[in-house]
Image (cartoon, helix red, strand yellow):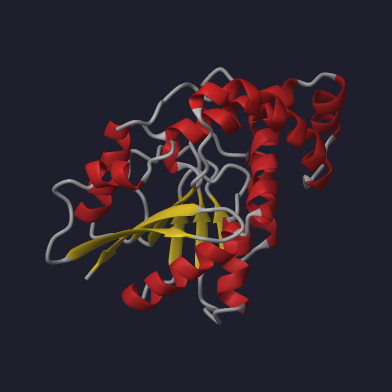
Amino acid sequence: MRRVHLFEFEDLRWFPNWIRVCLTRLIIVMHRKFDTSEEMALLLNKLMKKTGTTKIVDLCSGSGGPMLDTVVLLRNKYKIENVKLTLSDLYPNLEEAKRINRVYDYIRYRTSPLDATKLNNVEEGILTMVGSFHHMKPKSARSILVEAQRKNQPICILEINKKFPIVLWWLFVPLSAILCLFITPMVKPLTAKQIIFTYLIPVIPLCFAWDAVITSGRIYRSEDLDVLLQGLGNATYRWKKGILKGKTEKIYLTGCPI
C-alpha cells in the first residue's frame, strides 16, 4: 500500500474532547457541501432492497456526521419509513447524543464508547462508516471487513477520495486552515468556544488543517481495498467497490450477503 498513516489529532486519546467535537461539527459542514448524504442514501437504498434490512448501525459517528441527513433522505426520498439508525463512536459526543435521543424516535446515539474494530457485540443491521475508515490501520481495517463477512452483516463504507501530493502538504495545510475560517459560521450549534478558538486563538483551524491534509494520505484507494479484500468474498457474501462522481470524487466499498 502507498498510503501514509501519520497521526490525526482526532485519534489521540489525550486530545481534548471539546476540540474533537468542534472538529467533527466542521466535518459535517464539509459533508453537506459535498452531498455525501445524497450518495450515502443512494448506496443504502440499494443495500436495503437486496437485504430487506432497514436498520443501520453507524460506526465512528462523531457529532452525527452525514448519517442524520441520510436517514431523512431514506425516509422522504426513498420512502423507507421504517428505517432506524444507531449512532456510535469510540469518543461519543454526549451532548449531541442527549439531543438526538430526545428529538428523534427513529435515531438513537449510543452513549457508551464503541470500538469499531470490535464488532462482536454490535447489534444487527447495515454497518456504515462515512469518512472514517481511513482512521483504521490496515490490520484493523481488514479485521472490520473480515468480521462483517463472518457475521454475514451488510456494510457500507464511503470516503471522500481527495489526494494532496505529499510534496505540497506544506501548501495545503495553510489553505485548509483558511477554509476553516470561512466554514465556521455554518457550524451548528455554533458555540462561543468554537468562535474563540477559531478566530481569536486559532487552535481549531490548525488542528482541522492538519487532519484534513493527513486524511488525504490515509485514504484507502481502490488498489488498497484490493489488498484488504484478498481472500474475502464467497458464495454467500459479495464485495463491491467503486467511484462516485459528484461535487467531489468519493470511493465506496459495500459488503452484502447473497
Image quadrant for the C terminus?
A: bottom left
Q: Position of residue 242 (x, y in %)?
A: 37, 58
Figure check: 190 above or below 75: above
Q: Position of residue 106 (x, y in %)?
A: 57, 66
Q: Which one is nearer the viewer's eye here, 216 or 127?
A: 216
**Residue 194 occupies which quadrant of the picture?**
top right
- Asked whether the viewer can see residue 157, the reply is no
Q: Is residue 161 left or right of residue 28?
A: left
What residue do we see at 15% from left, 66% from top? Answer: 236
Question: What number of labels is visible?
Answer: 0
Q: Which one is nearer the viewer's eye here, 3 or 199?
A: 3
Image quadrant for the N terminus?
A: top left
Q: Is residue 24 left or right of residue 125?
A: right
Figure check: 44 above or below 228: below
**Residue 204 occupies which quadrant of the picture?**
top right
Figure check: 97 above or below 204: below
Q: Is residue 165 left or right of residue 197?
A: left
Q: Position of residue 46 (x, y in %)?
A: 41, 73
What residue do we see at 30% from left, 44% from top? Answer: 223
What residue do we see at 44% from left, 33% from top? Answer: 218
Q: Position of residue 208 (x, y in %)?
A: 66, 30
- Which residue, as the protein is rendered here, is positioned at the far bottom? 79
- Asked whether the viewer can see residue 51, the reply is yes
What residue do we see at 45% from left, 61% from top? Answer: 56
**Residue 138 occupies which quadrant of the picture?**
top left
